[in-house]
Image (cartoon, grey):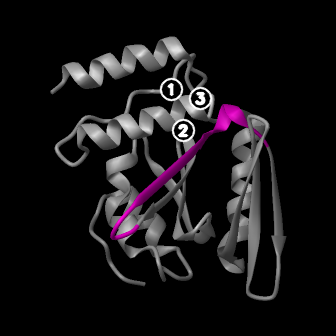
């Protein structure tokens, strides 16, 4: 596999991927969407919505990242919001279905070698409550790599997913705007 030299945890997870096809840009951009103190445990490639992207299992949540030339898509699923996981494998690839907060997200075309292990580890996370049990999700890391617009977009996604309350949303939005 290719060497990415992004961060030790991301590099270790990327080395285990059976294929990085369609996810090299996302691997490079992953630190921009991670929260402070969040580490990457496992990666997989797949198709969600309108394109290829990267599925990342972290110490705090499940993230799907698609970073195209013209658009970026980030969707995350805090472990506390995931109620169940389904894996269905075919000959070469399969689909992972995540049920979270009354919604269903299906990530298709995950290489079979990665998908089954990914689903099993994700089930273990939600079964044991391995994610930190805090009342609020941590604020995204404020760094030079992450501009205010993308931080606000991530915050909007967290509120839409039900991961934070409206009060937490307003508080974090104010913090982000005050950091300018």
Between 94 and 6, the one lying in front of the other is 94
Q: What is the secondary structure assignment of the residue under circle 1?
A: loop
Residue 128 position within the rendered picture, expressed as x and y whole percent measured from the top left:
74, 36
Farthest bottom residue in view? 91
Going 35% across and 22% down the picture, which residue do you hit?
173
Check disc 2 and report the residue beneath it: 60
Which tag is nearer the camera, tag 3 or tag 2?
A: 3
Asked whether residue 3 is drawn in magenta, I would say: no
Question: Where's the N terminus, which quadrant?
Answer: bottom left
Report helix, strand or loop for mark 3. loop
Query: Quarter of the image holding residue 143?
Result: top left
Q: Which mark is residue 75?
A: none
- Position of residue 151 in the picture relative to residue 168 (left or right): left
Residue drawn where x is 55% and y is 60% of the image: 42
Q: Which residue is mark 3?
A: 163
Helix, strand or loop at label 2? It is loop
* Callout 1 touching callout 3 (CB < 8 Å): yes
Q: Position of residue 118 (x, y in %)?
A: 68, 62
Task: Calculate the distance from the C-alpha at mark 3 to the C-alpha at mark 2.
Answer: 12 Å
Sequence-wise first label, 1 or 2: 2
| Magenta-drawn segment | 68-83
Question: Image quadrant for the C terminus?
Answer: top left
């Amino acid at each position: 596999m290719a060497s990415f030299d992004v961060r030790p945890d991301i590099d270790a997870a990327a080395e285990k991927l059976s294929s990085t096809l369609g996810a090299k840009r996302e691997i490079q951009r992953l630190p921009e969407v991670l929260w402070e103190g969040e580490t990457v445990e496992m990666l997989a490639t797949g198709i969600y919505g309108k394109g290829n992207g990267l599925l990342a299992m972290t110490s705090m949540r499940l993230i799907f990242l698609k970073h195209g030339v013209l658009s970026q898509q980030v969707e995350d699923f805090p472990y506390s919001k995931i109620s169940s996981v389904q894996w269905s494998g075919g000959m070469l690839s399969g689909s992972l279905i995540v049920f979270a907060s009354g919604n269903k997200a299906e990530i298709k075309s995950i290489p079979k070698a990665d998908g089954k292990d990914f689903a099993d580890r994700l089930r273990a996370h939600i079964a044991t409550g391995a994610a930190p049990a805090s009342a609020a999700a941590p604020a995204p890391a404020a760094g030079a790599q992450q501009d205010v617009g993308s931080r606000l977009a991530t915050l909007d996604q967290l509120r839409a997913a039900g991961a934070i309350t409206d009060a937490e949303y307003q508080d974090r939005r104010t913090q982000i705007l005050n950091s300018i």
